[in-house]
């Protein structure tokens, strides 16, 4: 199996605020640093540990390509990453990378650039399952009561046992994902993740349990938690080497 990984990292990170940006060295969440390493580089490192991953395509804001390549220097990932210009939203960014995937790629995994703590074992399990299910995503069960509302009025209480909070990576057979993007373009359909495009094709998407550590770093409160997870991973790695 030959796998390409698409990492959308073209967001602006405007929710972080000035103080957090100054502390972690960037105004964009994906380029903030933990232990001196950009978050997106920590994310990419997880996929470099998997032999079947043949290429990684990183979608970044237009005009930032040179700076991003320079930022990745010394992180250990720069020689394995193709930096491409992203689009106005996630779908455009992933679509641009999908069009650039090399010939001979059997499977495409899409993973948020700001999810650096996904366990490698989960990535490997998702890649194994896609051979059977063709479309596999990670998800976590909803633990709190979820209300459907109209403005400030509750319309319904949704059954928790039927709800999953989607994570990445989202893994697909290449042909299936390309057909889903083409169908979305033809229908002017915009989804919030890649799985929603495959669902739009009326194809099944298999969900496997994700990880509580696999957080998406989007706001200031996530950075303190990210520091704890980063330190924990370093301790676990050191213990494993002993």
Image (cartoon, grey):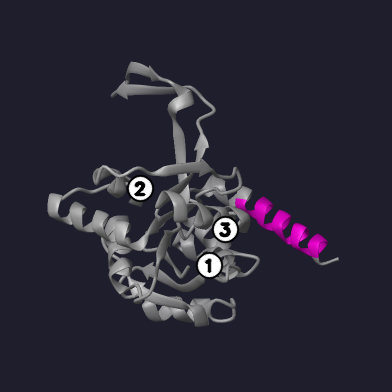
The answer to whether marks 1 and 3 mark residues whose Cβ atoms lie closer than 8 Å is no
Above or below 234: residue 64: below
Does residue 180 appear left or right of residue 121 in this picture?
Answer: left
Q: SS class of the residue under badge 2?
A: helix
* Mark closest to the chain's N terminus, 2 or 1: 1
Q: Which residue is mark 1?
A: 44
Question: What residue is drawn where x is 58% and y is 67%?
Answer: 50
Q: Percent position (x, y) of residue 120?
A: 61, 58
Q: Nearer the viewer, residue 106 or 69?
A: 106
Q: Of tags 1 and 3, which is closer to the observer?
A: 3
10 Å crowding of disc 2: few (<14), some (14-19), many (20+): many
Give the camera-side residue of 49 and 39.
Answer: 49
Residue at horizontal 39%, vertical 81%?
Answer: 66
Q: In this orientation, does residue 7 appear?
A: no
For the record, the magenta segment spans: 226-240
Which residue is located at x 52 percent, y 77 percent? Answer: 72
Classed neighbour count for the residue bearing mark 1: other residues with Cα under 10 Å, few (<14), some (14–19), many (≥20): many
User: Which of these two is toward me, 213 or 136?
Assistant: 136
Separation of residues labelled 2 and 1 (CA atoms):
21 Å
- For the C terminus, which image quadrant? bottom right
Mark 3 falls on what kind of element?
helix
Q: Which residue is mark 2?
A: 195
Residue designated by label 3: 124
Front-most of residues 219 and 22: 219
Q: CA distance from mark 1 to mark 3?
A: 14 Å
- The image position of residue 236, as x and y in percent, is 76, 57
| Residue 175 drawn in magenta | no
Can residue 49 be seen from the camera position used here?
yes
């Amino acid at each position: 199996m030959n796998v390409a990984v698409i990492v959308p990292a073209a967001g602006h990170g405007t929710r972080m605020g000035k103080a957090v940006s100054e502390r972690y060295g960037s105004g964009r969440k994906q380029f903030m640093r933990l232990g001196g390493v950009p978050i997106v580089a920590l994310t990419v490192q997880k996929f470099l540990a998997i032999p079947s991953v043949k290429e990684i395509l990183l979608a970044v804001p237009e005009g930032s390509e040179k700076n991003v390549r320079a930022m990745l220097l010394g992180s250990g990932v720069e020689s394995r990453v193709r930096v491409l210009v992203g689009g106005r939203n996630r779908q455009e960014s992933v679509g641009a990378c999908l069009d650039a995937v090399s010939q001979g790629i059997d499977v495409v995994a899409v993973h948020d650039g700001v999810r650096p703590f996904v366990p490698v074992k989960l990535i490997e399990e998702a890649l194994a399952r896609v051979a059977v299910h063709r479309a596999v995503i990670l998800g976590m069960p909803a633990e709190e009561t979820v209300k459907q509302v109209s403005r400030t009025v509750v319309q319904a209480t949704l059954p928790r046992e039927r709800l999953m909070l989607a994570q990445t990576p989202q893994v697909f057979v290449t042909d299936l994902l390309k057909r889903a993007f083409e169908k979305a373009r033809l229908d002017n359909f915009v989804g919030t993740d890649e799985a929603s495009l495959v669902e739009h094709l009326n194809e099944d998407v298999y969900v496997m349990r994700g990880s509580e550590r696999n957080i998406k770093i989007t706001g200031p409160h996530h950075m303190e938690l990210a520091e704890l997870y980063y330190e924990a991973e370093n301790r676990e790695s050191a213990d494993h080497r002993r």
